[in-house]
Image: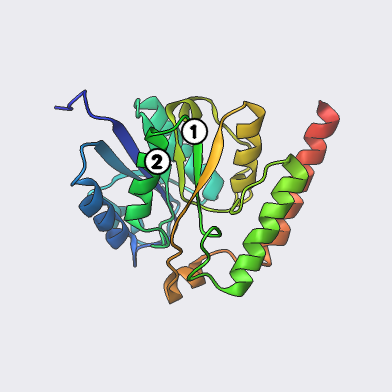
Amino acid sequence: MLELSKKRVALVIPAYNEQAVIASVISDLHKKFDKKSYFYQIVVVDDGSQDNTAVIAERAGAYVIRHILNSGSGSATATGLSYAQQNNFDIAATLDADGQHAANDVLRGIEALEDTNIDLLIGSRLINTGGMSRLKRFGNKGLSFITYILFGISVTDSQSGLRIFSNQALTRLKWKTSGYEFCSEMLWRAKQIKLKIDEFPIKAIYTDYSRAKGQNNWNAFNIVKVLLQRRIVEFFSE
């Protein structure tokens, strides 16, 4: 039976073919959040994986939502946050499934959001860039600059997957893109509905595995193309 006095927190992990690391990501979250007074649930959105990601995640103690087909990071994130909203969670956090984000940073972000009136808190790897390659820094800074040019939103790390959402953000924030471009579009939509956005510094954890799984800078061109198309379409429909 749930303790109603506890803050309800959903930890959402979009995942695609992450059987090698998903159990350790979930285990690290359990170790960190078991020591705290939250009622929390780890929600893995298996985005049409062709491996045993879903089975391993369930065994590790996560609630798993399965997409039959791979629909993209933006779509998987939307599914997880919709689940959190429909199940009356007070706060939600999203994080990557490849082990890039430290459980302690997830907890820090949740605690920081509780102490402010912020609606969307971004975990920035570019406030302190230790551990991030020069090429990765260049790509992320470039996309953050494009986000500013297209949408007038100034953040240091527009592509970060570690994000903390208030209840208001869970209820109101929606986006239309399904791929990685959703990271920038989410900020645009948050601005449109006047949500308060901020950042906090996080540690970038890069391994050979996460480097192989992550975005490359060539993918940034596709992200920019989709964002530009979306911006033009909506500009002429206003």
Q: Residue at x 52, y 46 (%)?
A: 199
Coloring scheme used: rainbow
- Amino acid type of the residue that numbered disc 1 sits on in the rendered structure: Ile
Q: Which residue is mark 1?
A: 118
* Coordinates of residue 223 in the picture (x, y in percent): 69, 54
Quarter occupied by the N terminus: top left
Q: Are marks 2 and 1 in contact (CB under 8 Å)?
A: yes
The answer to whether 23 is drawn above or below residue 3 in the figure is below
Q: Single out the residue that lies furthest toward the bottom.
A: 208
Q: In the image, residue 14 lies at what x, y percent?
A: 44, 50
47 or 200, which lies in front? 200
Q: Earlier in the sequence, mark 2 or mark 1?
A: 2
Label 2: which secondary element: helix
* Left or right: 18 as drawn, with respect to 201: left
Asked if residue 119 can be seen in this view, the reply is yes
Residue 103 position in % (x across, y down)? 33, 54
Q: Residues within 10 Å of mark 1 (few under 14, many from 20)?
A: some
Q: Residue furthest left?
A: 1
Query: Which residue is label 2 attached to?
Result: 112
